[in-house]
Amino acid sequence: MSDSAARVEGLRVSLVRDGVRSDVLRGIDLTVGRGEILGMVGESGSGKSVLALAMMGLLPVAADPQVDGTIRVGDVDMVHGSPEQLRAVRRNELGVIFQDPMTSLNPTMRVGAQITEATHDSAESIRLMSAVGIADAPLRFTVYPHELSGGLRQRIMAAIAVAGRPSLIIADEPTTALDVTVQAQVLDLLRELRDEFGCSVMLITHDLAVAAQIADRVAVMYAGRIAEIGATEEIIHRPTHPYTVGLLRSRLSLDTPRDRRLLTLRPETASAAERMKGCAYHSRCPLAVERCATEQPPLAPASQGDTAGTADTATEHLRACWRTVADVQGYTHETSDATPIASLARPGASADTTATPAAPAVRITDLTTVFALKGGGRRKRQVHALRGVDLTVAAGEAVSIVGESGSGKSTLLRVIAGLAPATTGRVELAGRGAQMVFQDAGSSLTPWLTVGDILRERLRPAKLDRAAASRRIGDALEAIGLPETVAALRPAQLSGGQRQRVALARATIIPPSVLLCDEPTSALDASLAASVLNLIRELRRSLDMTVLFVTHDLAVARLMGDRVVVMTEGTIVESGDADDVIHHPEHPYTRSLLASVPDIGVLS
Amino acid sequence: MSAAVPEVGSRRFRMPAATLGAHAGTRLSVVILVALGILTLVALFARVLTPYDPVQPIGALNLAPGSDGHPLGTDSIGRDILSRTLIGVQVSWFSSLVIVASGLVIGGIVGIAAGVFGGWLDALLMRFTDLFLALPGTLVAIAIVAALGYNLQNTLIGIAVVWWPYYARIIRGEVKSFAARPHVEAARVAGASRTRVVFRHIVPGVVPTAIVTASLDIGNVVLLLAGLSFLGLGQPAPAPELGADTARNLSQLLSEWWVPVIPGLAVLVLSLLSNLGGDAVRTLLARRR
Amino acid sequence: MFRFIVRRAGSAVVLMLVLSAIIFVLQAVSPGDPVKAYLGANASPEAIAAKREELGLNAPIYAQYLRFIANLLQGDLGQSFRTHRPVLTDLQSFLPATLELVIFSFLVAVLLGVLFAVSGSLRWKGGALFRGPLLVLAAAPPFLLALGGIVLFYAQLGWLPANGRGVDSSSPTGFVILDSILTGQPASIGLAFQHLLLPGVVLAIAPAIAIGRILRSSLDATMNADYVRTAESKGLTPFTVLRRHVVRNSIGPGLSMAGLQLGFMFAGVVVVEQIFSWPGIGNYLAGSIPVSDFPAIAGVTLVLGTVYIVTNAIVDILQVAADPRLAA
């Protein structure tokens, strides 16, 4: 028995995707200690999920994986072992929790049977169900997955994962698909599993704060390599890699200054081939020197000098960067003052809205919306999405509406936009009406139309001639920071961030009175999200718009709204000045939401 | 359900393209479509290309293929098989195209109307469509032709009556799925009129599926037409028709096999080419996106 | 589940009513005159008028339809112009032969289809050598396959018979193989099987491909599903994963396609029976078409249509049984 649950050495993986082979993992060395929780953090495309699949020996055959290096779990090399050996390891040593609890369980098999496949004993299965916090385990033993909520399904996954007392549980974004409060429960559960069963946990996530919440150590991945790894405290408070620094600083917290531009990472400008030559981060790195573009930095101890000898590789702070730690940390302090947002806190003339009794931009009175769900047979279920909502938004005001899925926040926005019916109640909108920006920008743009076509459609009522319309489109694109040439492209040719910018251009090419934003950044990586949020705040001021911003993220809500409105079960439970609501919540529901927010501050 | 865009792990990998590789696949598809184009031209000018009158006896009886002046031989009353087959191909090919086109048009109208308007009209149209789909199409077609009388026009009517529901179902489903996509809501919020939403933001998305469905369906119609013709539900006696020419000469199978077999082989070529053509259209459209 | 069965049975009844209505309308517009068929072309005008009255042809159209339905329920499908016997009697004597052929052929089709799908999905070595030719054969008109089969296996190799059922079918149930087993005649089982082979396989090729293709794509989709990865992560053997997690979740589309194809086979059987002189309903229909024997054609359409409708209802019910999510 070694002191590690898993040991990865020199792991390289290349996969074929859409007919093109690419190197997804490019030399990973990693040890997961016994009883340790290791957080693997990276943006999409960093290769963290492929690492998880490789460790289980489940790389998709269809992608024709080529693997180099070794992955030792127990006594078996998951790269070179026989299929029988790998199966034995998966059965006895590994447990796994995947991202999407909706698709990770067999829909045609009772959940109890699915757990028992791993435990081989139904009494043990029921015991495990209770152990992972499922009430009425014997009753729930015989239900099908579609009869359970997302949180409960993820608990079923956890029960499967701990069956057979594995030495290592691999959790691949186990909380991403879940609401904040459920998210916190699942994280707690992972920690409990470690404490109770003594297993190690490898927690894969895109959110540094989620990892910081429960991990003993954190590894930051970038483009298939480890950029930095070390004790959680170290990584969060004394990061030594420019990428980690960037991630930490572009991350929003409940204390992010509201009147400053959010810090963002530079966008990627280098081609894939260029990135592979040196440090993959060099083209985005503010500290890059010549060497960074040509030579790959090795993963080396962060503490300079001779301490390497005393440090134990399992806990040592390692980094892959040519610049010295002092350089990186010096930079951190030097530029921590961000530029303030262009103009004032409130737009234009309405500096003191309380004094001016101007007509409100949005006035909602006693709004109810009831949907009829097609249920089984004749029993038509009714869902009360909104139950008597009153909301008045002053002209020029920005209001964030925050709540969990099913709170009615999106329905409210859709009713204002005219996309969903109001069963009773009234919605009044000022002058130029409302425009909306959707959660998934990619699918909110018609795929076969060019950006120019899409924008021109909004200009139709203006009856401009061709040249004038083109000029207007060019201006609108410029205003959102895209070159005019983008007008000739189709949405599929744009990146995620660019698509959300185009969606914003469509909404604002003729400035509406009210801009409705339905979680416009929740599908974007942190840094991209920050740049879109910056843009929305700037547009709000330059175009003098009222903004209604729906989000599940309290930090974003605080940042984007002068006022924050908290919704649950179709009603507004709290409303007030953004900082007041976040820092002095009154309603118990708001408090429970706040308590669930994974925050780096929790650590200190 | 899951909001975030996951990476590799749960996005699952697309199945690899054909073993021929990406470019060879495209090239092969183009070759197939060119072959189909040539076939259509041959069918179009069949009357000009036939060496002899297809219905008049012009040579010795039962000449084997490869005979002088009769590359595919002659039948039991001395008619040129090549000439008959060419005309048969013409009838078969254009009839199939007509049926598929009728399916696209009728099914398209019904499907778009049902999908766009929804509500009671959708319910009504789809009940009707499902009813037709649940009936045995071929048998109903046979009964219709039998009742109306045997000729090509009635055969086409009989098949067309049972052929459109399939298209209506598929097109309606596509319309519904496109109508539910965020870009349609986005267009509505952006102020696009209802007709504009339908014809600019929904229908163009349905077209590729409809075209692929139709092109993969031509082969089915070729076979069904040949089958009905074989049973005698086609043009009356002297007219050349692929299925009927096989049926009428069945008795020669063990003596002069080519007389019944050649028309059947022509059907095989037609249907095989159309199937490959359907795959080619699908490949090319998928690549274009 | 029970509710679903009741609902599905109800819709099957509606479908049969619609089918009968279509046949009724077609009968009304068809040029053949049933009265002359009964009485012969030389009947006196008085006799014709009397027969018209007797057959209810002077009644209003809805009354005629009700009468038509009532007759159907009593098994009266009219009289064949060609055989001058009640259509029902004809059908009764021909149906068993058709059922035997179609059922045998269906089993062959399912077997070939499953082989097609599994060999592709599991990437069996040499599977393409089996799938390629099958794909080409499936593009051929069934009559060409039949001719090819006869030339090769009957005329050239002399391995298989190509005509009829080989055994007198006036046996107790009309199902030759079943009868042979009941009466303990192993020799005639062999003979009957030999006769079934050629027409059965010819009829099976096209449905086999249809079933195989759809099954293949649903197998591929299921094997890529997240829950299959979950099952693999439990360390189950590939066979167990396949049996418990893949089969049940991918069987649905294959099942419904199989049902659809079984229905199609009752239409496709017409050509095959004619070529192989198989004494079944299809052959009866093929014989009725050239002489425009509409009552016979209508009768066959009704009977085979009913078989088709019932088959599809059963398949739907099986599908719901396989996937509890569909039972809403």
Image: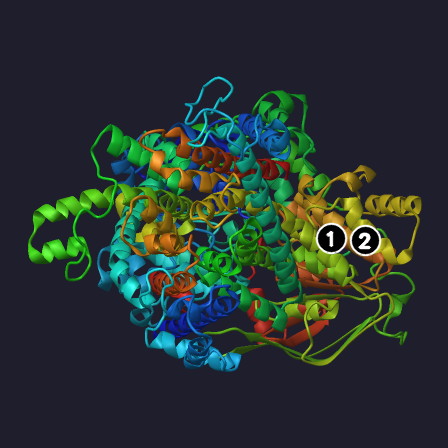
Contact? badges 2 and 1 (CB < 8 Å): yes
Task: Please name the amino acid that badge 2 sits on.
Answer: Glu
Quadrant of residue B75 in the image?
Answer: top left
Identify the residue at horizontal 92%, vertical 43% (top origin).
A467
Q: Nearer the viewer, residue A216 or B18?
A: B18
Q: What residue is pinned by disc 1?
A: B200
* Circle 1: element type: helix
Q: Is residue B48 above or below residue A352?
A: above
Please state, as top left, top right, bottom left or bottom right, where the C terminus of chain B lies in the image: top right
Q: Nearer the viewer, residue B182 or C191?
A: C191
Q: Is residue A27 left or right of residue A222?
A: left
Q: Is residue C232 left or right of residue A383?
A: left
Task: Please name the amino acid that badge 1 sits on.
Answer: Arg
Quadrant of residue A601 in the image?
Answer: bottom right
Q: What residue is pinned by disc 2?
A: A457
Q: Nearer the viewer, residue A147 or C322?
A: C322
Mark 2 closeness class: few <14, some 14–19, many ≥20 residues within 10 Å: some
Q: Is residue A174 left or right of residue A128?
A: right
Q: Position of residue C152 (x, y in %)?
A: 28, 31
* Color theme of the render: rainbow
Residue B132 in sight in this render: yes
Q: Is residue A455 left or right of residue A594?
A: right
Identify the residue at horizontal 25%, vertical 37% (top origin).
A84
* Circle 2: element type: helix
Q: Which of the chains bears the disc numbered 2?
A: A
Q: Position of residue C184 (x, y in %)?
A: 6, 54
C-alpha gap between disc 2 and disc 1: 10 Å
Q: Position of residue B87 (x, y in %)?
A: 56, 35
Residue A161 in sight in this render: no
The mark total stands at 2
The reply to whether label 2 and label 1 mark residues of one chain is: no
